[in-house]
Image (cartoon, rainbow, N blue to C red):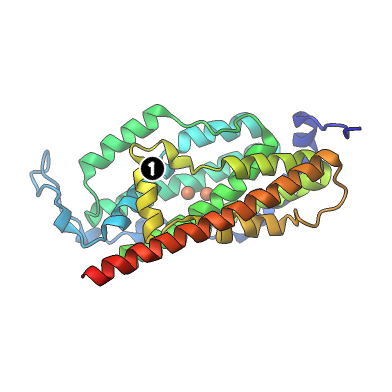
Amino acid sequence: MAAQQITQLELLRELEQVVEKELNRHLGAAKEWFPHDYVPWSEGRNFDGLMEGDPWSPDDADVPDVARTALVVNLLTEDNLPSYHHEIAIIFGRDAAWGEWVHRWTAEEGRHGMAMRDYMMVKRMVDPVALERFRMTHMSAGYESAHSEDLLRSLAYVSFQELATRVSHRNTGRFTTDPMCDRLLARIAADENLHMIFYRNLLKAALELAPDQAMQAILDVVKAFEMPGAGIPGFQRKAVEMAVEGIYDQRQHHDDVVMPVLRYWKVFDLEGLSGEGEKARVELGDFMAGLDDAATRFTEKRDALKARLAARR
Ligand SMILES: [Fe+2]
Ligand SMILES: [Fe+2]
């Protein structure tokens, strides 16, 4: 017999105290920082157009192509914040601790796009006209997650997604070979990590309240996982470029993003699952093994390709 399903409303109510506790922990752990602090303003120059300065040129900044691609992907991802806010405000609501988190999280995320854009413009790292056109296209399309309006799936998704974003920012910073940019992206990555912890802890509480439903939600999300920037024009090509260079690849997705969170939730030694939950757990284990194999194949292929290219040089 299937266990009694808990409704979304009951879950929201049951988790309210956890949200309050986690919000307080978050507020204690988060350090105040200022976007302007991270930007070398005196290195900036006017652009052509109204200011009659110099047009942008790819030679303005000595940034590897893949880092440029990743900066654009990561910034456009941050830019789409109004859509993400909409998603979580609908699911979590705007009342009490849930609402307080929604607004606080949105305020923190807002800083990321601002700081990145200021930095990239002052250092002329990317074409400002192309960037703005990309932003218009991307934001005009809006974003809707595959799990919108589903609390458990949304919590599982953001747990992985915040960590994935952390890894992507962190590695992008290193790939820019620009120490100040690296410092800014490390600062942003630290925020993403705290966001991940908040959501991860919330889903852990949900696993205790409704283990079968939470397990099914985790399985669905892991199977369908896609970065929030997937709607960016040309995203697939950009994602491949980033994977080939190692900014975000399947090995990192498996080892540094999905597995650590699954381990934290103890999904593979959780007790109290019924038939349905157990079935989901087995399928999750199989899926992760497949992901691990795919990551190994990808890395091998990539290394062989790089060795061939190096030999040719
Ligand atoms: Fe962010
Ligand atoms: Fe975040």
Q: Residues within 10 Å of mark 1 (few under 14, many from 20)?
A: few
Where, by quadrant of the figure, is residue 216 drawn?
top right
Q: Secondary structure at mark 1?
A: helix
Relative to 51, does residue 241 appear above or below in the rendering? below
Instruction: Indicate the position of residue 181 as horizontal and vertical percent values.
Output: 34, 62
Q: Horizontal placement of 68 versus 129: left or right?
A: right
Q: Which residue sits at x=77%, y=38%?
A: 213
Q: Position of residue 154 (x, y in %)?
A: 63, 38
Q: Amino acid at mark 1?
A: Gln
Percent of width and height locating residue 137? 33, 31
The residue closer to the viewer here, 8 or 282, is: 282
Q: Position of residue 308 (x, y in %)?
A: 30, 66
281 relative position to 23: left or right: right
Please tell me which residue lies in front, 168 or 31: 168
**Is residue 307 visible from the viewing direction of this image?**
yes
Nearest the viewer among 93 and 7 is 7
Q: Name the residue rendered at 43%, 41% in the picture.
A: 229
User: Which residue does the numbered mark 1 point to in the structure image?
Assistant: 236
For image coordinates 63% across by 53% down, the residue present is 288
